[in-house]
Image (cartoon, helix red, strand yellow):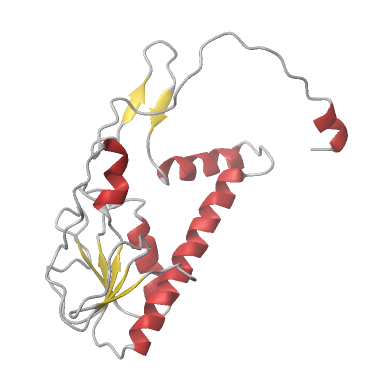
Amino acid sequence: MSLEAIASIETYEYSGAVYNLEVEPNHPSKDDQYYIDNQTGIVIHNCHPRDNIALRWLAKEYDIGYDMFDTIMSAREVQAKNLAYYLIDAYNQNVMEGPIVIHGKAYKPDVEYCIGSYSTLIGHYIKEFGAEVVYIDPLADNRDECVDDAERAVVLMAHNRQITYGYTGEQEKQNFYYNIKPGSVIVDPWRQLESTDTYEVLHYGNTR
């Protein structure tokens, strides 16, 4: 947009409906559904990244110019790749054997849906780097590469129930999906866990 175009933008008072594009009711774990407003016909869906994937396709299909949604999804992919590399680096530094463990395969705690899950995107890059990965998630609807237990390992805490559902007032903490073995290294991007005599915790992204 040119400076001339920016300068020509006018403001005015608006009177009319303002729509909150959010699935209602906002259930903490069952909001992965479509909702059609009965007055406007607007179709709403509360889900990242699925909405962004669809909007990225629409932007390309109709050639709308700058694709903000592609930028968002590209950043998401780069971040997943960086995290995968960090996990492999922790694996090598701690001389681990066996696969890297991703704690949570579904796209968030308390649901089973794995399509569009960030965990599987990270797992994709781990394998692309030549390492092994498994998932531990009792609810996952896709059981590929899922296990019920693991030996000493680098463990990514992909799920954090308290962070995900804290906005609802539910403060129940995330329970481990399995008994994490002594000597394991937990990578916690949420930065809530602390190291114990049993395992070391790395706060991913914390440069302080």
Q: Is 48 displayed left or right of 182 in the figure?
A: right
Residue lying at 35% horizontally and 60% vertically, measured from the top left: 190
Which residue of the protein is positioned furthest toward the right in this rendering?
Answer: 4
In the image, residue 164 lies at what x, y percent? 31, 47
Tell me, yes or no, if residue 110 can be seen here. yes
Residue lying at 68% horizontally and 43% vertically, measured from the top left: 66
Q: How many discs appear?
A: 0
Quadrant of the rendering where the N terminus is positioned = top right
Residue 150 to residue 4: above or below? below
Which residue of the protein is positioned furthest toward the bottom in this rendering?
Answer: 95
Foreground of the two, 92 or 60: 92
Q: Is 163 displayed left or right of 41 in the figure?
A: left
Residue lying at 35% horizontally and 68% vertically, measured from the top left: 123
In the image, residue 93 lies at what x, y percent? 37, 88
Tell me, yes or no, if residue 130 can be seen here. no
Q: Quadrant of residue 120?
A: bottom left
Foreground of the two, 179 or 127: 179
Residue lying at 22% horizontally and 45% vertically, measured from the top left: 171
Q: Is 111 displayed left or right of 191 in the figure?
A: left
In the image, residue 151 lies at what x, y percent? 16, 80
Residue 98 to residue 34: above or below? below
Residue 26 to residue 162: above or below? above
Foreground of the two, 166 or 116: 166
Q: Quadrant of residue 5?
A: top right
